[in-house]
Image (cartoon, rainbow, N blue to C red):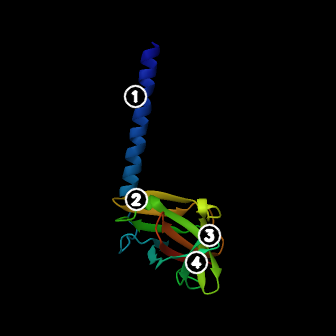
Amino acid sequence: MEGMASSFAARAALALLSVAFFCTAAKAEDYSGPRPPKADVPYLLHAGSLLSTEVLEAKEENRKDVTVFVVPGAASPVKTPMAEPIFIFTSDKIAADTLRLYRLTVNGANREVSGGGKKKKGAAVPLRLTVTQLGDRLYRVEAYESLDPGEYSLSPNGSNEAFCFSVY
């Protein structure tokens, strides 16, 4: 009797997981919102339209045993009032789950973030993101928590690509 009960429980759990998977897949396929015109660039979702992030290459500078990543300009021209921004992203060469969100510090005419020194001590900690697949290579990337006004960058892990924006 115990064997039958555990077998039934296992089949029931598998059935529930299958239903959950198919419901999630169906929901993702139902996405009918705007789609990014270019792959590998995060787009801010604003009231049913998309706004490209500022695409830059961060330069590495070594300062007193600390590596700092610097992008030009004191502020991004791409601005959002949303404290919890939502991005729509089509993945081609960049995997959506490699994106990291960093708060940038304004230093003169540049924005920067510390990559740390030896053993990565002093490195900026990325802010948390939620990544949801919407379709084939199409993703929704969201800040997990409310962002304070300021300068930010999404960057693929291990890359100097910077997709910048401001929260105001």
Residue at 48% in and 58% down: 131
First reached walking from the N terminus: tag 3 or tag 2: 3
Q: CA distance from mark 2 to mark 4?
A: 25 Å
**On-image quarter of the C terminus:** bottom right
First reached walking from the N terminus: tag 1 or tag 2: 1
The picture places residue 137, in percent across and down from the top left corner, at: 35, 61
The picture places residue 102, in percent across and down from the top left corner, at: 58, 68
First reached walking from the N terminus: tag 3 or tag 1: 1
First reached walking from the N terminus: tag 2 or tag 4: 2
* Type of amino acid at the residue the image marks with label 3: Val
Q: Nearer the viewer, residue 53 or 1?
A: 53
Q: Secondary structure at mark 3?
A: strand
Q: Nearer the viewer, residue 45 or 124?
A: 124
* Type of amino acid at the residue the image marks with label 1: Arg
Disc 4 versus disc 1: nearer the observer:
4
* Type of amino acid at the residue the image marks with label 4: Ser
Q: CA distance from mark 1 to mark 2?
A: 29 Å
Q: Which residue is mark 3?
A: 66
Q: Which residue is mark 2?
A: 134
Q: Nearer the viewer, residue 80 or 104?
A: 104
Q: Which residue is mark 4?
A: 166
Q: Which residue is mark 1?
A: 11
Q: CA distance from mark 4 to mark 1?
A: 50 Å
Q: CA distance from mark 3 to mark 2?
A: 39 Å
